Image (tube, rainbow, N blue to C red):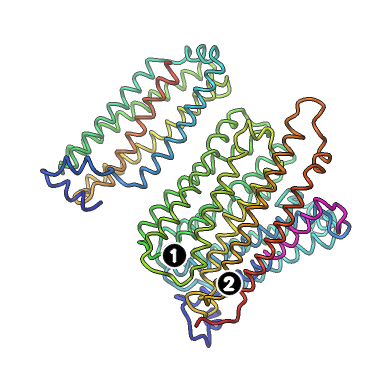
Amino acid sequence: MTQSISASIDADSTIKIVDKRLPGDLAMWFFILAELSVFAIFFIGFAVTEQLNTELFTASKAKLHPVAGLINTLALITSSFFVALALHAISQQKVRSTVIYLVLGQLLALVYLVVKLWEYSFLFDAGIDIETNTFFTLYFLITAFHFLHVILGMVILAYITLRARKNAYQQDISGFEAGASYWHMVDLLWIILFPLVYII
Amino acid sequence: MIGHQMMKGNAMNTLKYQSQAVAKPYFIFALVLFVGQILFGLLMGLQYVMGDFLASAIPFNVARMVHTNLLIVWLLFGFMGAAYYLVPEEAETELYSPKLAITLFWVFAAAGVLTILGYLLVPYSTLADITLNHLWPTMGREFLEQPTITKIGIVIVALGFLFNLGMTILKGRKTAINMVLMTGLIGLAVFFLFSFYNPSNLALDKYFWWFVVHLWVEGVWELIMGAILAFILIKTTGVDREVIEKWLYVVIAMALITGILGTGHHFYWLATPEYWQWVGSIFSALEPLPFFAMVLYAFNMVNRRRREHPNKAATLWALGTAVMAFLGAGVWGFLHTLSPVNYYTHGSQITAAHGHMAFYGAYAMIVMTIISFAMPKIRGIGEAMPNRAQVREMWGFWLMTVAMVFITLFLTGAGVLQVWLQRLPETGEALSFMATQDKLAVFYWLREIAGVVFFLGLLCYLSSFFTKEKAA
């Protein structure tokens, strides 16, 4: 690991090395795979239940706020983009840009949290909660579980922001990559969740 | 220093800290109780097919209570011994108070023996009267049958134990293994407190009962198991502490996330909201993952070993506990954890199959692992038992483990047939409970034979444990 990172600082060999190795730490990838498994089971459970209760699901989906979902999709994709820019910046040791990109990424994550909370209160006001029907049981479970992941992802981003500010990634950026990988996972999950739960 | 006195006169002193020797009485007493547990298991196994056998002296319900309570108590003795052995070595300092550890041993042992004698010698209701259960009723619940006074004793012992370990860690090195172990042990003590809460509403009673039972075995005990396994792997393989600790964190993070939310698989039929069917099913379906990670972890570390540790038996137990925990807790747990499946299998012999292999694989075997590693050092034999004794120990390992696989398979067969005959039929052809039990007799006989083999394996193990031979 250390070998490939020291090589990546060398401008000439950057592209070759980045292509070859797994970014971050293997332990983080194991954790990400475990997380993806949980969501995969949730998504499959949702899809199968939808096939068994088509009318209920269609009627319930109509009660969701599609614009809120769209705003959140854009917020998370853009946030992930800034985190990718931050990773690019830190690999070139541009600490100031790294920190700015990470802060922008976290601000967009905050937009997600606010919109999602608004959406929950919008549903509660309409008298809808987790026990309304099977669709909303799954809607609240899946989105709330994802919501918790956004919060955990923000904690991780905040941690790597502080570490970047302290110049902790001069030798080894695998910790940074592990955090960024986790954040991309959170984004990826939403990209599957949004069409599955809101649209299709 | 008690540990020092124990070691006097031994030429092969390989203990890093002499106070680690306080683990010895804990380990020995754990094994004594283990023998008792198996004897009562054999008795019950026979009563399944010969209902009158010793039924007036030791009725089935009493034998069952003794069998399960001995299991829990010997594992607790094992965990305590493990902690007294492991914490000083990790903290790189002597135990804060060996005297307190020995005193608490005698308190706990006396309370345990008196409680078991109480179960055996007087009717349970009389035991409740003698121990003034009416003042604070906590008796009568499965696995938590102990009189209130015993429960209070357990809390006092646990507090003294945690104090002793906590003071040791505070004055020494702080390692991830010690932190994970302490978190597990503190969790064990905290969740036990729910055994004092006994609501009269039956649904609530069961609800909080699971806070002890589930959050022990599928929560904090997994931290204890992970910490002990990590310690043994560091010692026997010589792989870098950083690597082993990093994977320990991954394993326990997954164990806690799946285990805590997995509590939902006990809430399916307790008048709880419907979403528990989803939460319980999905998260408990993933509980095998951390156990599978432990298998990869243990085998990888052993394959990457940098030294050949002479204690082959301890390494075998460490690999064995990972595999058997994955099968027993992971795979056999998954078999009946999804709510649409559990609707039919709840409380059947499939549950018994899972319970046997999970407890043996995850918890009996991890205690055997640390005993196997620590005892030769505590007894001054050296890094490991002599080769011949190790061979006998490994025979014990294989006999017990293979026997447990067969016990589990026979109980699974019994469970599948039971569900088929008694639970699945929607109309009048479903058999009654007792009529079904008669049809399962062949499986119960086979299980009893496997149980006898298990007991022989245990005797083989003990013959190695109590060997007088010295290393060559």
Quarter of the image for residue B101 reads: bottom right
At label 2, the amino acid type is Leu
Question: Distance between the Cα atoms at labels 2 and 1?
Answer: 17 Å
Q: Is residue B85 left or right of residue A154?
A: right
Q: Main secondary structure of the magenta part?
A: helix
Give above or below for A87 relative to B219. Answer: above
Please rate how many residues cluster around mark 1, counting C-alpha atoms within 10 Å: few if below 14, some from 14 to 19, many from 20. Answer: few
Q: Is residue B41 magenta?
A: yes
The single residue placed furthest to the left in the displayed view is A12
Mark number, residue B388: none
Residue identifier under label 2: B100
**Residue B76: x %, y % from top left:** 61, 61
- Report the front residue among A39 and A129: A39
Q: Residue at the spot x=58%, y=69% of the render?
A: B393
The single residue placed furthest to the bottom in the displayed view is B9
Residue identifier under label 1: B170
Q: Earlier in the sequence, mark 2 or mark 1?
A: 2
Q: Is residue A145 magenta?
A: no
Dot 1 lies on which element? helix
**Residue B110: x %, y % from top left:** 71, 69
Total label count? 2
Q: Residue at the spot x=76%, y=35% of the render?
A: B421
Label 2 resides on the chain identified as B
Q: Residue at the spot x=25%, y=51% of the render?
A: A1
Span highlighted in magenta in the image: B34-55
- Report the front residue among A6 and A156: A6
